[in-house]
Image: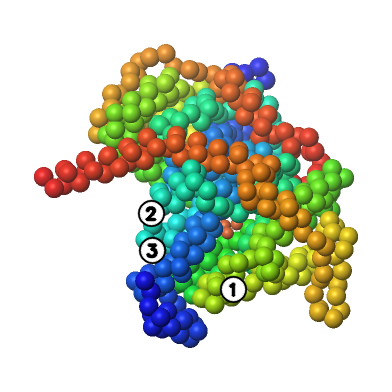
């Protein structure tokens, strides 16, 4: 059991803004929460490759095809650093991966929606990577050193993804009637799921207070969401895209944009597994994992043989 | 020769032909590699295969861009999106379906090794500055593709029984598609005249020696070089696989050709 003195000292370090490193003492619960958050983040990067991968072979120009391939490659890299970061807490990548393929570890629900047109790829870059940036910029200040550093590194690449998505969406939104239709339709479908990426309202988010106390997070879900809405409204307007919320209006008093009610029933149903693409996403990852098993075994066996050779 | 092809008469025509042949190989194989994104056997390979796909499509795009300039076509996308399968000049090896990881590795190894020798040679021969600059730049990435695939041939060959039988099968099945790499037809002969292509036969035995030594080190059996070899893809006589690949790759661009997609 963690003693009160240990807990107090730990809290003092957090309050002083010190970073906690893998070898430092930490409360069991802090470790658990971090494993949960970091691995969920890692799984999200990996599952996130699927909806985008769905368009790699169909991107309508070579330039944009390369942009998308580079992005998907970056996401695999993000998954890698995050898994390595999580491993510093005493778990293995294999355990973590099997936890979401066979168990019920979560990943961001946003990736349980389908990418129907090429505009979805642009909107994912703009909105989904945009929301990830808001979240990850905060997490780059997280009290756990390896998590903070992973986020700092990731954020630079996410900014690039967002810029590229927004740029192409702008072209579509100002393009032919068909392109405009695809662009607006994609925004209509992705807007609410993106707002849900920040998690439940603070009042329904039991973990939030503890995570903030421990400096894992430094802002609440609602604060992050509001920040995201504020900056996105202007970006939408600049390219002639309408956000699908009739209640969106600028509040002179608060200086922020007020928005309509988020469809939380849908959110919880997708989190629990009933979303349009939940089964397909997990199935695709499961197939890749199981079909890859002989490859991983071969690599291990080859390494073992080489080691034996060296020893003899 | 395909129905509509003519032998390049001028240096410029020969150059366009070579650029397109090199580019088509790389676009089509890069496309096959890109199908792995998110489905690789481990995260490191998701990263590596996407990276190699990106390099190859990048090489293709640069080659097409130059060809477009010489041939008065609007841009690099013209060649990728607005030609039909009988106009594509890639070898059939590039268009075969993705297969399992062993097939992907066997194909990549044989192709990257061929590219390695080809580019090394062309860098010495080609006088056209812009083309040569591209060859030099892409050569660095080809070396990495070769190293990556060679290491995997060794791991899979000398790994487990299953991996050994899979990679052996892959080499056995792909072997009949390796002959096209070494073919010299009329358009290539014309290009050789202008120092834009090379007599690949001069290093074919070196290529084989490298293949043999890698497969032997991987405890694999080298298939018979003197078997039936597929031919004709360079002049548009492809397998049935290419049409489906292009249908997917081109559909959106062709549906809305007047829209801006860059
Ligand atoms: Fe990412
Ligand atoms: Fe992320
Ligand atoms: Fe991203």
> For this rendering, which residue is in front, B73 or B77?
B77
State how many labels appear.
3
Question: What chain does badge 3 belong to?
Answer: A
Specify few, some or many for label 3: CA neighbours under 10 Å numbering under 14, 14-19, or 20 or more. some
Question: What chain does badge 1 belong to?
Answer: A
Q: Position of residue A68 (x, y in %)?
A: 62, 49
Q: Is residue A221 above or below residue B104?
A: below
C-alpha separation, residue under disc 2 versus residue under disc 1 = 28 Å
Farthest residue to the left: give it: A312
In terms of secondary structure, where does tag 2 sit?
loop
Q: Is residue A6 left or right of residue B78?
A: left
Specify few, some or many for label 2: CA neighbours under 10 Å numbering under 14, 14-19, or 20 or more. few
Q: Position of residue A100 (x, y in %)?
A: 50, 48
In terms of secondary structure, where does tag 3 sit?
loop
Q: State the image quarter where residue B95 is shown.
A: top right
Where is mark 1, residue-wise?
A: A209
Q: Is residue A103 above or below residue B101?
A: below
Where is mark 3, residue-wise?
A: A88
Q: Is residue B235 left or right of residue A85?
A: right
Q: Residue at x 62, y 33 (%)?
A: B13
Q: Are marks 1 and 3 on the same chain?
A: yes
Q: Residue at x 42, y 13 (%)?
A: B228
C-alpha separation, residue under disc 2 versus residue under disc 3 = 9 Å
Question: What chain does badge 2 belong to?
Answer: A
> For this rendering, which residue is in front, A242 or A240?
A242
Q: Is residue A27 left or right of residue A63?
A: left
Point out which mark residue A92 bears.
Answer: 2
Q: Earlier in the sequence, mark 1 or mark 3?
A: 3
């Amino acid at each position: 059991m963690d003693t009160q003195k240990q807990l107090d000292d730990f809290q003092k370090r957090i309050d002083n803004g010190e970073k906690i490193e893998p070898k430092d003492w930490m409360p069991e619960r802090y470790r658990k929460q971090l494993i949960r958050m970091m691995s969920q983040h890692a799984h999200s990067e990996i599952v996130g490759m699927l909806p985008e991968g769905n368009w790699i072979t169909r991107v309508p120009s070579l330039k944009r095809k390369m942009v998308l391939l580079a992005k998907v490659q970056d996401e695999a890299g993000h998954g890698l650093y995050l898994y390595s970061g999580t491993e510093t807490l005493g778990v293995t990548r294999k355990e973590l991966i099997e936890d979401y393929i066979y168990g019920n570890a979560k990943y961001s629900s946003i990736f349980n929606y389908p990418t129907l047109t090429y505009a979805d790829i642009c909107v994912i870059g703009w909105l989904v990577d945009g929301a990830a940036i808001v979240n990850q910029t905060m997490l780059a200040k997280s009290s756990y050193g390896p998590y903070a550093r992973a986020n700092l590194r990731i954020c630079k690449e996410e900014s690039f993804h967002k810029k590229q998505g927004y740029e192409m969406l702008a072209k579509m939104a100002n393009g032919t009637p068909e392109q405009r239709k695809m662009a607006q339709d994609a925004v209509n479908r992705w807007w609410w799921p993106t707002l849900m990426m920040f998690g439940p309202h603070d009042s329904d988010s039991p973990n939030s207070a503890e995570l903030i106390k421990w400096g894992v997070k430094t802002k609440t879900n609602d604060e992050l969401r509001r920040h995201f809405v504020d900056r996105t409204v202007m970006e939408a307007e600049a390219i002639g895209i309408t956000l699908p919320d009739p209640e969106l209006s600028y509040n002179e008093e608060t200086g922020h944009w007020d928005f309509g009610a988020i469809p939380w029933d849908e959110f919880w149903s997708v989190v629990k597994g009933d979303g349009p693409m939940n089964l397909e996403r997990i199935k695709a990852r499961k197939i890749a994992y199981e079909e890859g098993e002989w490859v991983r075994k071969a690599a291990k066996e080859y390494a073992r043989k080489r080691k034996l050779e060296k020893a003899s | 020769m395909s129905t509509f092809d003519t032998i390049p008469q001028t240096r410029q025509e020969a150059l366009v032909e070579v650029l397109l042949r090199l580019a088509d190989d790389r676009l089509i194989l890069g496309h096959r590699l890109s199908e792995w994104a998110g489905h690789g056997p481990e995260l490191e390979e998701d990263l590596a295969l996407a990276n190699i796909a990106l390099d190859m499509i990048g090489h293709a795009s640069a080659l097409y861009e130059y060809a477009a300039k010489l041939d008065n076509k609007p841009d690099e996308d013209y060649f990728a999106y607005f030609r039909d399968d009988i106009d594509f000049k890639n070898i059939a090896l590039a268009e075969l379906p993705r297969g399992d990881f062993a097939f992907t590795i066997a194909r990549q190894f044989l192709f990257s090794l061929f590219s390695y020798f080809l580019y090394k040679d062309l860098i010495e021969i080609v006088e056209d500055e812009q083309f040569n600059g591209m060859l030099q730049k892409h050569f660095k990435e080809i070396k990495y593709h070769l190293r990556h695939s060679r290491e995997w041939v060794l791991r899979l060959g000398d790994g487990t029984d299953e991996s050994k039988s899979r990679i052996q099968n892959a080499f056995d099945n792909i072997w009949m598609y390796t002959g096209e790499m070494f073919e010299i037809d009329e358009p290539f002969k014309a290009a050789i005249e202008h120092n834009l292509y090379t007599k690949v036969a001069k290093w074919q035995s070196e290529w084989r020696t490298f293949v043999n030594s890698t497969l032997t080190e991987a405890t694999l059996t080298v298939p018979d070089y003197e078997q039936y070899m597929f031919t004709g893809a360079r002049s548009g006589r492809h397998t049935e696989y290419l049409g489906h690949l292009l249908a997917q790759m081109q559909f959106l661009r062709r549906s809305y050709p007047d829209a801006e997609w860059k």
